[in-house]
Amino acid sequence: MLSVYNYSDPIAYISDSIYYISDQADGMTLSEFSKQAGFRSPSQLIDILKGKKKISDSVLNKITDVLDIDKADYMYLYTLVSRLNSSSEQKKLMYDLFLNDLKPAKENCDIFR
């Protein structure tokens, strides 16, 4: 599995993870991933991956259930999504601090500064 800590963009991480899984799972398609995650249609997931729709908490839960990531990785990804969805520069700086604190010690490297 890919390390979420190597990413500053949650959409890139989700996209890369889906394609990583498709390579590992005998060519699982985006359509199959969407169905497994509980989306009504693949176009919902495609809109998220293209940045046309925000990632809500419920959507993030659907995606991470299929990705099967642990709680620490989920918290980091959740904070990345919160940062992405924030329109305030002050909040983005706050999320940067949270992200830095959530990284494991060996991975802690101020990628947002």
Image (cartoon, rainbow, N blue to C red):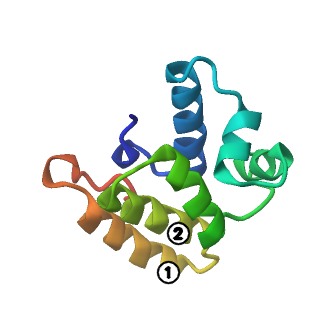
Q: Quadrant of the N terminus?
A: top left
| Disc 2 and disc 1 in contact, CB within 8 angstroms | yes
Q: Quadrant of the C terminus?
A: bottom left
Identify which residue is drawn at 60% across, 49% down.
11
Q: Is residue 90 above or below residue 68?
A: below
Q: In which image quadrant can residue 76 be found?
A: bottom left
The residue under label 2 is 83
- Judge from the rendering whether residue 48 lies leftward or rightward of residue 83; answer left or right: right
Q: Secondary structure at mark 1?
A: helix
Q: Is residue 84 above or below residue 9?
A: below
Q: Amino acid at mark 1?
A: Lys
Q: Is residue 68 above or below residue 1?
A: below
Identify which residue is drawn at 61% across, 39% down.
15
Of 99 and 26, which appears nearest the observer?
A: 26
Is any atom of residue 9 visible in this view?
Answer: no
Q: Position of residue 39 (x, y in %)?
A: 76, 54
